[in-house]
Amino acid sequence: MNNMNNNDLIGKASKQLNISPDKLTKAMGGKSLDKAVNEMSPEQKEMLNKALNDKDYAKKILSSPEAQNLIRQLSGKKNKS
């Protein structure tokens, strides 16, 4: 994925999600990023790569209700009621 190492990708993704890299790693079930990415479909890999490299696309994805719910879960915040 664009010659980025695991720590760079975790850091970039955690920054986009506004959570710590440790929380993101724990949310991945302790899997290495390589293993998690290798388990993705080609479409999911393409979406991840695009989101990590295109700020507008990342904002669009992160503003979806599903992403907002996941971000709240990862950050330990309660869901809106």
Image (spheres, rainbow, N blue to C red):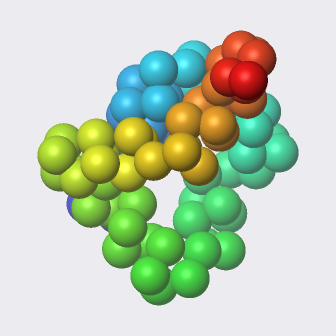
Q: Quadrant of the C terminus?
A: top right
- Residue 76 in percent (x, y) is at 75, 16
Any part of residue 34 in sight: yes
Taking the spot 76% from the left edge, 17% from the top edge, the residue there is 78
Taking the spot 59% from the left edge, 49% from the top edge, the residue there is 66
- Residue 40 in percent (x, y) is at 60, 74
**Residue found farthest to the bottom:** 42
Q: Nearer the viewer, residue 66 or 16?
A: 66
Q: Nearer the viewer, residue 8 or 18?
A: 18
Q: Quadrant of the N terminus?
A: bottom left
**Residue found farthest to the front:** 81
- Residue 15 in percent (x, y) is at 40, 25
Any part of residue 5 in sight: no
Position of residue 73 relative to residue 51, above or below, is: above
Residue 73 quadrant: top right
- Residue 35 in percent (x, y) is at 67, 63
Position of residue 66 relative to residue 20, above or below, is: below
Q: Is residue 34 left or right of residue 57?
A: right
Number of numbered discs visible in the structure rendering: 0
Position of residue 60 relative to residue 14, above or below, is: below
Taking the spot 17% from the left edge, 46% from the top edge, the residue there is 56
Taking the spot 55% from the left edge, 20% from the top edge, the residue there is 19
Q: Nearer the viewer, residue 59 or 46?
A: 59
Position of residue 44 relative to residue 66, above or below, is: below
